[in-house]
Image (cartoon, grey):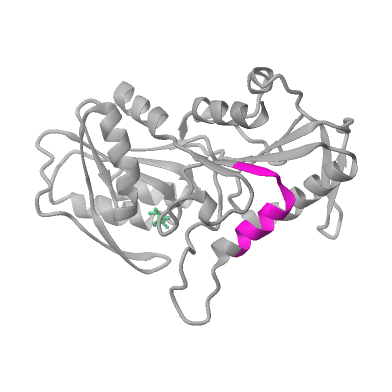
Amino acid sequence: MIYTLFESPIVNDNFAANLNADIGRLNIRSFPDGETYLQLLDDVQDRAILIVDSLNLPNDKMIPLIYLCETARSLGAKSIGFVCPYLCYMRQDKIFNPGEGLTSQYFACLLSHYVDWLVTIDPHLHRYKSMSELYSIPAEATHAAPVVANWIKDNISEPFLIGPDSESEQWVSSMANIIGCDYKSLTKKRYGDKQVEITLPIDLKLDQKTPVFVDDIISSGVTMITAIKQLKSMTVSKPYCIGIHAVFNEQTLTLLKEAGAKSVITCNTIPHQTNQIDVTSVLMPVIEQKIN
Ligand code: R5P
């Protein structure tokens, strides 16, 4: 039985049919004081439950998610798997300043308490090398690289992939491998939530190729915007900006375009007007493996 609390774009009749599953119906609303009311409208006794939702805006989403898990278990659900295309709280993977906490670990501990297994797409694995370093439940990361690479192949001629920072090298290198094109990653120093410095490598030569920035997350947009501005000295071609997870708002989209982005494209891990790349085909085999 599949549930989505926040209307995941990948949950539809086809998705359910492929998994030989039903889409569960929920009655969910806020009481006048803002507290959450949740009711399951189908029998879940002995059913395997699959929840599909991204955890952008996690602070608002966690209470409904916890209530869904607890309610399903109280009604006799056999197991609860969580497909979370965008997994939050992965970037605080180190104590950067005295007095901080390791929120990536606290969040992993919280989520592991409610679900039996987890599947996600391109979580921000930087200082952690694998999900098992963080999660005590079976937790698997699949990758959007094949579908992003195919989209680039189909839509951009002579692409040159650029990762705006060292972490993004993992994404651009595997996509460039699939496409058979050149790539480079830049160097980024972050000074604050909205302040970064980006340096181009001295051997960066785009020739006549089309620049394509690729990053896992676009949030405030400052990383992409700074990278676009830096690249202006190198080429007159406007760059495409591709983010796997669209954690940004309308205002950021305007700023990206004003900075010189030719087009901003994202995967449908988070519903967004820039979604053009469907990740269902990379998720499906991993989910099938988990439920069979
Ligand atoms: C961080 O290292 C990530 O890979 C992204 O580069 C970062 O989250 C983007 O955030 P923003 O859009 O706020 O610069």
Picture quadrant of ligand 1: bottom left
139 vs 96, left or right, is right
Q: Quadrant of residue 291?
A: top right
For residue 262, say whether it is visible: no
For residue 149, say whether it is visible: yes
Q: Position of residue 58 (x, y in %)?
A: 63, 54
Count of numbered circles on the image: 0
Q: Position of residue 223 (x, y in %)?
A: 34, 56
Residues in magenta, as a range = 106-118
115 vs 121, left or right, is right
Asked if residue 146 is positioned above or below residue 132 in the image, the reply reads above
Residue 110 belongs to the span the image colors magenta: yes
The residue shown at (47%, 63%) is 93
Instruction: Depth check: give the residue in front, 280 or 80.
Output: 80
Asked if residue 61 is positioned above or below residue 194 in the image, the reply reads above
The residue shown at (20%, 55%) is 230
Screen quadrant of the C terminus? top right
* Majority secondary structure in the magenta region: helix
Q: Position of residue 193 (x, y in %)?
A: 43, 66
Residue 136 belongs to the span the image colors magenta: no
Q: Quadrant of residue 107?
A: bottom right
Asked if residue 26 is positioned above or below residue 185 in the image, the reply reads above
Asked if residue 147 is positioned above or below residue 87 in the image, the reply reads above
Screen quadrant of the N terminus? top right
